[in-house]
Amino acid sequence: MKTVNKNSIWLPGLLDNLFLENRMDALNNYETFSIPAINIIENLPNFVVELAAPGLQKDNFTIEAEEDTLKIASKKVEEKKEEDNDSHFKRREFNYSSFERTFKLPENIKTEDIQASYENGVLRVTLPKMEEKKGLKKMVEIS
């Protein structure tokens, strides 16, 4: 099971913004390039994809399996709140407001039996494998 690499989404936007008046805004836009880390575990009966996404709810995720591709996406809409106090973020990295990860699935995945759970900030997607067909051995009589 492999991740599908896409062109970096932050570099073109960063280069576009270099010539704007406020160059630091391009560097401070963590929403643009925050992609959660993953673990891919293979064992005998299945693959397990673990995705670190703290602070989200299970309703924020969409998981689609189509042919040989698994897509995990999240969209979290945060309302901007104006507060009267004097505190504000100087640097904010706790932000997985939206992301998409795509994986190329091996041929032996039972897509209809994929299961997912979200607990303690980790999304766990279990991808069961099809049972391998054992070659039947048959003795052929020579006539």
Image: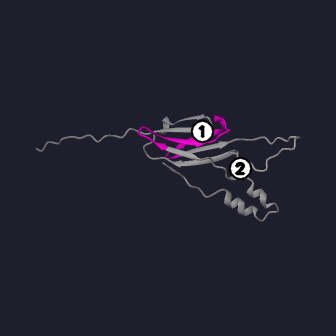
Tell me how far mark 2 sits from mark 1, CA to CA: 19 Å
Residue sitting farthest toward the left: 143
The residue tagged 2 is 31
Kind of residue indicated by mark 2: Glu
Report which quarter residue 7 is drawn in: bottom right
Report which quarter residue 96 is drawn in: top right
Kind of residue indicated by mark 1: Val
Camera-near label (2 vs 1) is 1
Q: How many marks?
A: 2
Label 1 residue SS = strand
The residues colored magenta run 41-69
Please tell me which residue is depicted at 53% across the width and 42% down the height of the picture. 49
Please tell me which residue is depicted at 63% across the width and 39% down the height of the picture. 61
* Front one among 10 and 90: 90
Disc marking residue 122 = 1
Disc marking residue 1 = none
* Residue 103 x, y percent position in the rendering: 53, 48
